[in-house]
Image (tube, rainbow, N blue to C red):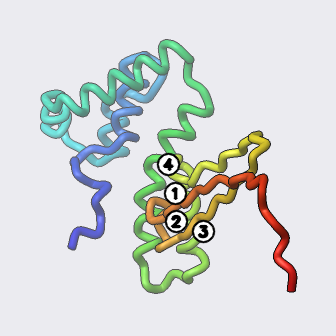
Amino acid sequence: MDNLPLHHTKWNDRLAFDVALTLEGSGETLQEIMGRHNITPNDILAYNADPIFLKKVEHYRGEVREKGLTFKLKARAQAEELLTTSWLLIHDPAVSPAVKADLIKSTVKWAGLEPKTEVTNESGGGVKITINLGPDPRDARTIEATTVDVQDATAIEH
């Protein structure tokens, strides 16, 4: 089983981000990037022929041009790289279950996969029951029912 599904290419988002900064004139030189990422000129040529890499670099260039180099953009690039570390920790048998649970909860939150809490202002009332069938929020099942007003009900006496 592949324990690192996040590494489907030989390049990562941080490399694409660094190349975009260089092309926009606000980053390191290409030689510095190659040294830090431990890549060769042949690697650069291969990445230059990779349409996904080029699209990612162009995306980052657009963000740098439109928004400038912001803290949020740097943090997002760093967070994407840290997902690999999170993945490794979650699958490491030496890591405590509490730490794994926190990492899983955080990842689900960052991905926007948390169940939505809906507040209704209907006067009719109702019941909403959510049953979690596993650790993945997508496993949750929700049953909703509305109340029915009965006019001709007689009281049940004990």
Residue 100 located left or right of residue 1: right
Q: Amino acid at mark 1?
A: Thr
- Residue 124, image x, y percentages: 75, 46
Q: In the shown orientation, is residue 121 left or right of residue 46?
A: right
In the rendered structure, are the residues bearing label 4 and label 1 in contact, judged by CB atoms less than 8 Å apart? Answer: yes
> Disc 4 versus disc 1: distance between alpha carbons?
6 Å
Q: Position of residue 60 (x, y in %)?
A: 41, 25
Name the residue that disc number 1 marks. 107
Residue at the image position 37 percent from the left and 36 percent from the top: 32
Binning the other alpha carbons within 10 Å of mark 1 as few (below 14), some (14 to 19) or many (20 upward) gives some
Secondary element at tag 2? helix
Q: In the picture, residue 88 is in which quadrant?
A: bottom left
Instruction: Please tell me how crowded label 3 is: few (under 14), some (14-19), or many (20+) other residues with Cα within 10 Å.
Output: few
Q: Which mark is residue 102?
A: 3
Q: Tell me the CA gap for discs 1 and 2.
A: 5 Å
Q: Which residue is mark 4?
A: 111
Q: Are marks 1 and 2 in contact (CB under 8 Å)?
A: yes
Task: Please name whichever residue, 70 or 154, is drawn nearer the observer in this view of the structure.
Answer: 154
Is 21 or 123 nearer to us in this picture? Answer: 123
Q: Amino acid at mark 2?
A: Ile
In the rendered structure, are the residues bearing label 3 and label 2 in contact, judged by CB atoms less than 8 Å apart? yes
Compare marks 3 and 4 and give the one earlier in the sequence: 3
Q: Badge 2 is on which residue?
A: 104
- Please state which amino acid type lies under the numbered disc 4: Ala
Q: Relative to 62, is 108 above or below?
A: below
